[in-house]
Each structure stands twice: as C-alpha cells, then as structure tokens.
Image: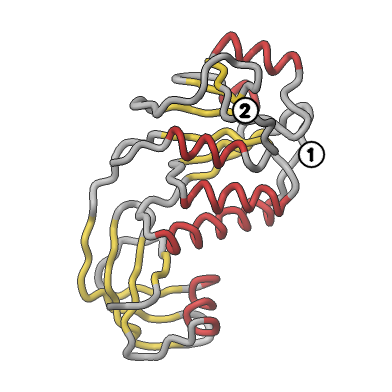
Amino acid sequence: MPAERFYIDAELTGTLTLEGAEHHHLAHVMRVRVGEEIELVDGRGSLATARVEALTKQGARLLVLQAHTTPLPPLHLTLAVPLMRPAKLELVIEKCTELGADSFYLYAAQHSEKEALSEHGFERLRYVAISAMKQCGRLRLPKITLRKFDDILGGNLYFGDPEAARGPENSAEPCVFVTGPEKGFSKKELDMLKTKGVGVRLHTNVLRAETAPMVAAVYYHRED
C-alpha cells in the first residue's frame, strides 16, 4: 500500500504532472523515487494510486493506475472564524479540517486581532488545509473564503455565546457556526447575530478565539 498521499487539482486519470509544493514534498521531503507508488487525492471525493514515471526539477510525471470516487455528502458545517494572528488561524484551519469542517468563512470582526489577510497568508492557509486533509484521510478539501460580517448572516445560523442558556446539540441540518474574536463580539455584531441566529454556549468556561471553532466542529460535525 502506498505510504504517502498527495493532492492534485485535476481529474485522477491518465498521466498527470505534480508541481509546486506537492512536488517539492514528494521529491525533496519524502524522497519518493521513480517507480514507486503513491496515493493521489483531488479534494472532491476521488482517491487514486499512481506510479512515479519521471522526476524533474519542475515536477513529477505520474501514471494513474487505479482510481475510485466516493460521492461526498452535501456540505454540512461551515465555520465562520474571525481573522486572528497567523499561527492561531493556521491552528484553527488544521484542527477543524481534521475534525470534519466542510468550509470556512474568514471575516474581520470589529475586535479582530487582524483586519486583513494577505495573499501569501491566504495561500498558506490553503496549504495547511491540504496537509490536514491528506494527514487525516478525508477526501474533501474544505473551501476557505473571505467574507464580510454581513455576508455570513444567513441560513441555519448559530453563534458562540457564553451567556446562552442552551448548550450545543449535534445538528442534522447544514449550518453556519460563527465564533468571535478574543475580545468578543461588538454590541452591534451581537445584536445582528441574535436577530439572525441562535446563541449557543459551547462550554462553561470562556474559550479562546482559536479554541471555540474546534469545539464547535466537534459538536456540529455530522457522522456520514
């Protein structure tokens, strides 16, 4: 059985070329050689076994030997997470990907530690999600998007509220769960959330900004 899994954004059939960070990981970190077999995942439900046919400085030429597609269930849990320091945000993306979050909305709260995300920072988060997807064995790559606060307020909406009377329940319906920054939601944001969604007490203790999304992922992830 292939020991390593790599991500490629392509249909898993025929001959493919693995480039960029995944090629670097294959050739220089894992030191895979020509003739060895690896696993490929496309982040959309397909898993394949491929053989390395050639290695160059620019990429690895792969021959797909067999592939299998598993139909993915509908998106269930979207986590709306405030912008925060890069190390914290990377931790959230990594662990919540492992815990089954289907997608992420990143937003700038009024009390956010960071007000914007650079292109490099965004690409770094995507790389973290890809690595977590491969490591934990899941076949869906969570989508990460930047949203304005107003744009996350819709549908089956929940939000973290330490003063809420109710605790979390495993929701059977697709939902968006909004967590707040270290200093909490502003009064305006909290009023909007209470109008559009349902407040949930995730824990009896006050959770850090990077901890709350992980707890929400545990409670609101549906076992398929």
Instruction: Indicate whether 168 appears above or below 24.
Output: above
> In this orientation, which residue lies closer to the viewer: 199 or 154?
199
Name the residue type under label 1: Glu
Say which residue label 1 marks.
113
Q: Earlier in the sequence, mark 2 or mark 1?
A: 1
The residue at 69%/18% (across/down) is 189
Judge depth for marks 2 and 1 and give the one in front: 2
User: Could you tell me residue 193's position as x and y percent?
Assistant: 61, 16
Q: Identify the residue under disc 2.
A: 204
Within 10 angstroms of label 1, few (less than 14), some, or many (20 or more) residues? some
Depicted 19 relative to depicted 158: above or below: below
Q: Residue furthest bottom?
A: 34
Vertical side of 203 occupied by 95: above or below = below
Q: Marks 2/1: CA distance? A: 24 Å
* Image quarter of the C terminus: top left
Classify residue 89 as left or right of residue 35: right
41 w.r.t. 203: above or below = below
Whether residue 134 sits left or right of residue 179 in the image: it is: left
Q: Secondary structure at mark 1?
A: loop
- Residue at 43% x, 41% y is 102
Number of numbered markers: 2
| Left or right: 194 in relation to 174 | right
- Name the spot of residue 97 as percent of width and height, x first: 48, 49
Which quadrant of the structure image shows residue 162? top right
Disc 2 crowd, CA 10 A, few/some/many (<14, 14-19, 20+): few
